[in-house]
Amino acid sequence: MPLDEWISTADQALRTLTGGAHAGRAQPTAQEGELTPQERRLSGALLRVDHVGEVCAQALYQAQALTARAPHLRAHMQRAAADEVDHLAWTERRLQQLGARTSLLNPLWYAGAFGIGLVAGLAGDRWSLGFVVETERQVEQHLASHLDRLPGADAPSRAIVEQMKADEAQHAAAAQASGAAALPAPVKLAMRLAARVMTRTAHYV
């Protein structure tokens, strides 16, 4: 792998973990209603979980781009990562607006996801694409559950999550159309269990 790709990946990791992400698209927005302190804390906790998901997405896509055999697959991973940078910046900014913080364990989440992405990429392009499909489908379901739980008055957070959900569905569809292999059921289950640990921990830490 060329040295410049590793340098670029390291730079992206630093941006992800230090709040240096800049969105290429305008942040979705809506008029905020009156939030109680409890509702504001709930929104902050849910957006913190979503932000952790975007930290992991950066790590996964960067690792999979590094290990992709086909140039078009590498380009696909890089395009998806760019969308996820938008999500990262949006959720970070919304957390600030809510007076909430990002997860204290972000370096750990990033390192773990990067390792998983390397394994998926080294397994081969079709399996790597299959991992993208399953990941994005699980994330889409997760975001749908957050839309159900976000306070009704928190329209700005809802607008962000709705756009993120739409983007994740597009990523899954694009990966499927590119020839993704279907992952075995035990792998899908392991992914769900790992995601459950992450989301429950990030809700508080």
Image (cartoon, rainbow, N blue to C red):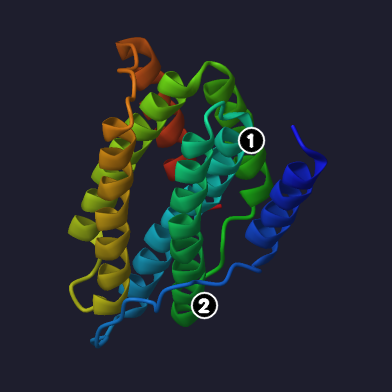
In 3D space, how far apart are the residues under numbered discs 1 and 2 (Cα atoms)?
Answer: 32 Å
Q: Is residue 74 above or below residue 122?
A: below
Residue 48 in view (yes/no): no
User: In terms of sequence position, does the residue under pointer 1 or pointer 2 come before the other?
Assistant: 1
User: Callout 2, which amino acid?
Assistant: Gln
Which one is in front, 175 or 142? 175
Q: Residue furthest right?
A: 3
Asked whether the viewer can see residue 76, the reply is yes
Q: Which residue is mark 1?
A: 66
Q: Position of residue 21 (x, y in %)?
A: 60, 67
In the image, taking residue 203 as reference, residue 19 lies left or right, namely: right
The type of residue carrying mark 1 is: Leu
Q: Which label is found at residue 21?
A: none
Residue at figure coordinates x 46%, y 26% from the top left: 128
- For the residue pair 120 and 76, the one nearer the viewer reads as 76
Density class for disc 1 (Cα within 10 Å; few <14, some 14-19, many ≥20) is many
Residue placed farthest to the front in the image?
71
Task: Name the element at disc 2.
Answer: helix
Residue toward you, 205 or 74: 74
**The image quarter in which residue 20 lies:** bottom right
Instruction: Please identify the quadrant where the N terminus is shown.
Output: top right
Image point (24%, 88%), residue name: 31
Q: Secondary structure at mark 1?
A: helix
The answer to whether the residue labelled 1 contacts the one labelled 2, judged by CB atoms less than 8 Å apart, is: no
Q: Which residue is mark 2?
A: 96
Give how far across and how far down residue 111 sits, in percent.
67, 38
Residue at the image point whose x is 25% and y is 40% from the top: 173
For label 2, count other residues whose C-alpha is less than 10 Å away and answer few (under 14), some (14-19) or many (20+): few
Note whether 24 is above or below 81 in the view shown.
Answer: below
